[in-house]
């Protein structure tokens, strides 16, 4: 099936081998084994088959099929369902996709929709860290979330650079409609990205406090690191948003001042011309 990117079993921090969909229940029955299945835009038939193999909750499966979910974390018994927004820059426009993660005691199912990089580097990174991978699905969850958050940073940097390029056009006493429209476009993208990043902080906090079975003590520092990165990104985006708002306000103020000066000059010239004929009347 084309939607299946890969499906691999792991035990004691080592890769055991590729597993077929029909072999998943047998692999999960082996103590100490967990399965990591990667999917890309699966259809309902495949998702239902995956649901049966892992025992996924109906509501979570419905959400995973519909790629229009807000970022969130929901608990279903001893498993969690997480929705993350992924982001990419396409022709200087922030395009948002989604990744849905089903994480249980012995499995991770990642489902990608829309704009998203492949998670092949994440799997490779995990497989080269047997000590981390020995912590089970929680470590894979950390690696996936860390990968998504790390990909926000270049976009934030690009938005900052774009704003810097516009500054010299904005701080003038002339109204530049094109520049103002670009500012509003950047501001919209900043807000879109902030809405993607901000929920990650709360997710990490919940995972650390409420899901000790999935996030053991050895992994808490990793999730706190993601939480810190997300917090710094949100603060940076807030600063950029405030600067964008200020830039528009300053430009409008400069235009207003310039217009007032023009009005004063016109008024002065008008008064001068009004009284000039009386001053030039001959008394001869």
Image (spheres, rainbow, N blue to C red):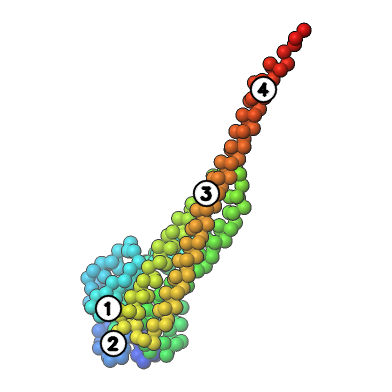
**What crowding class fits label 1: few (fewer than 14 Cα within 10 Å), some (14-19), or many (20 or more)?**
some
Mark 3 or mark 4: which comes first in sequence? 3
- The answer to whether mark 3 and mark 2 are in CB contact below 8 A is no
Label 2 sits on residue = 27
- The answer to whether mark 4 and mark 2 are in CB contact below 8 A is no
Separation of disc 4 and disc 2 at Cα?
Answer: 96 Å
Query: Which is more foreground, mark 4 or mark 2?
Result: 4
What is the quadrant of the N terminus in the image? bottom left
Mark 3 or mark 1: which comes first in sequence? 1
Residue nearest the observer in this picture, 19 or 142: 142
Query: Which is more foreground, mark 2 or mark 1?
Result: 1
Separation of disc 1 and disc 4 at Cα?
Answer: 84 Å
Label 1 sits on residue = 79
Disc sitting over residue 249 in the figure: 3
Separation of disc 3 and disc 1 at Cα?
Answer: 48 Å
Q: Residue at x 72, y 13 (%)?
A: 281
Mark 3 or mark 2: which comes first in sequence? 2
Helix, strand or loop for disc 3:
helix
Classify 213 as above or below 186.
Answer: below
**What crowding class fits label 3: few (fewer than 14 Cα within 10 Å), some (14-19), or many (20 or more)?**
few
Determine whether, in the image, residue 167 is placed left or right of residue 216.
right
Query: Which is more foreground, mark 1 or mark 4?
Result: 4
Residue 109's x, y, as percent?
A: 32, 76
Helix, strand or loop for disc 2:
helix
Classify 130 as above or below 198.
Answer: below
Separation of disc 3 and disc 2 at Cα?
Answer: 61 Å
Label 4 sits on residue = 273
Classify 22 as above or below 149.
Answer: below
Query: Which is more foreground, mark 3 or mark 4?
Result: 4
Residue 217's x, y, as percent?
A: 36, 86
Q: Within the image, what quadrant is residue 69 found in?
A: bottom left
């Amino acid at each position: 099936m084309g939607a299946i990117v890969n499906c691999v079993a792991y035990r004691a921090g080592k890769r055991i081998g590729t597993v077929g969909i029909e072999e998943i229940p047998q692999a999960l029955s082996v103590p100490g084994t967990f399965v990591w299945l990667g999917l890309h835009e699966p259809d309902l038939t495949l998702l239902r088959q995956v649901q049966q193999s892992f025992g996924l909750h109906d509501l979570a499966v419905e959400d995973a099929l519909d790629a229009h979910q807000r970022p969130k974390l929901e608990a279903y018994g001893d498993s969690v369902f997480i929705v993350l927004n992924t982001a990419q820059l396409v022709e200087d426009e922030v395009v948002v996709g989604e990744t849905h993660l089903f994480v249980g005691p012995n499995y991770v199912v990642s489902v990608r929709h829309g704009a998203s990089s492949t998670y092949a580097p994440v799997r490779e990174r995990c497989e080269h860290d047997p000590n981390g991978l020995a912590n089970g699905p929680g470590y894979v969850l950390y690696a996936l979330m860390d990968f998504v958050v790390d990909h926000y940073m270049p976009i934030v940097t690009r938005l900052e650079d774009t704003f810097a390029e516009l500054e010299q056009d904005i701080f003038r006493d002339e109204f530049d409609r094109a520049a103002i429209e670009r500012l509003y476009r950047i501001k919209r993208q900043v807000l879109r990205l902030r809405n993607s990043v901000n929920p990650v902080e709360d997710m990490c906090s919940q995972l650390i406090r409420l899901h000790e079975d999935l996030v053991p003590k050895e992994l808490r520092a990793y999730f706190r690191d993601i939480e810190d990165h997300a917090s710094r990104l949100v603060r940076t985006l807030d600063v950029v948003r405030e600067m964008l708002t200020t830039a528009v306000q300053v430009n409008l103020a400069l235009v207003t001042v310039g217009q007032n000066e023009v009005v004063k000059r016109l008024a002065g010239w008008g008064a001068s011309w009004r009284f000039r004929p009386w001053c030039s009347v001959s008394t001869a």
